[in-house]
Amino acid sequence: MITVTRLNGGAFALNPDLIERVEQTPDTVVTLVDGTKYVVRESVEEIVYRVREAKASIIALSHSLDHAEPGTSTRVLRVVPGPDREH
């Protein structure tokens, strides 16, 4: 999930697998595969970054679990945003 912000300031989580497209018109409009549209504060570039980070964290966790040492407890992956990014 990624977190985005409505123009009125309300934040909500969005499943990035359901995003069909993101457009700047001049507001950012996120269109889902079912046709639902959300107008959000984040730029197209920021949404692309958040989707990339969310998918990368899933791949990293999968890799970590696949390569865990036999007999050890399951590893926990914690994603920490970079210094120029907020949660």
Image: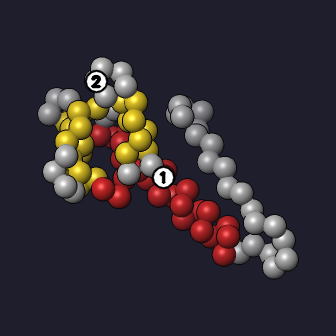
Residue identified by numbered label 2: 7
Image disc number at residue 54: 1
Residue 84 in the image: state x and y as whole percent.
54, 31
Residue 29 occupies quadrant:
top left
Local secondary structure at mark 2: loop
Q: Nearer the viewer, residue 1 or 48?
A: 1
Q: Position of residue 81 (x, y in %)?
A: 58, 40
Q: Residue furthest top?
A: 8
Q: In the rendered view of the protein, which quadrant contains the C terminus? A: top right
Q: Residue at x 84, y 71 (%)?
A: 72
Q: Assign a secondary structure to mark 1.
A: helix
Q: Amino acid at mark 1?
A: Ala
At x 28%, y 53%, the residue is 19
Q: What is the CA distance from the residue labelled 2 to the residue labelled 1?
A: 22 Å
Q: Amino acid at mark 2?
A: Leu
At horizontal 47% and vertical 58% (from top left) the residue drawn is: 55
Task: Indicate how the structure is coloured in the image.
Answer: secondary structure
Dot 1 surroundings within 10 Å: few (below 14), some, or many (20 or more)? some
Quadrant of the image occupied by residue 65: bottom right
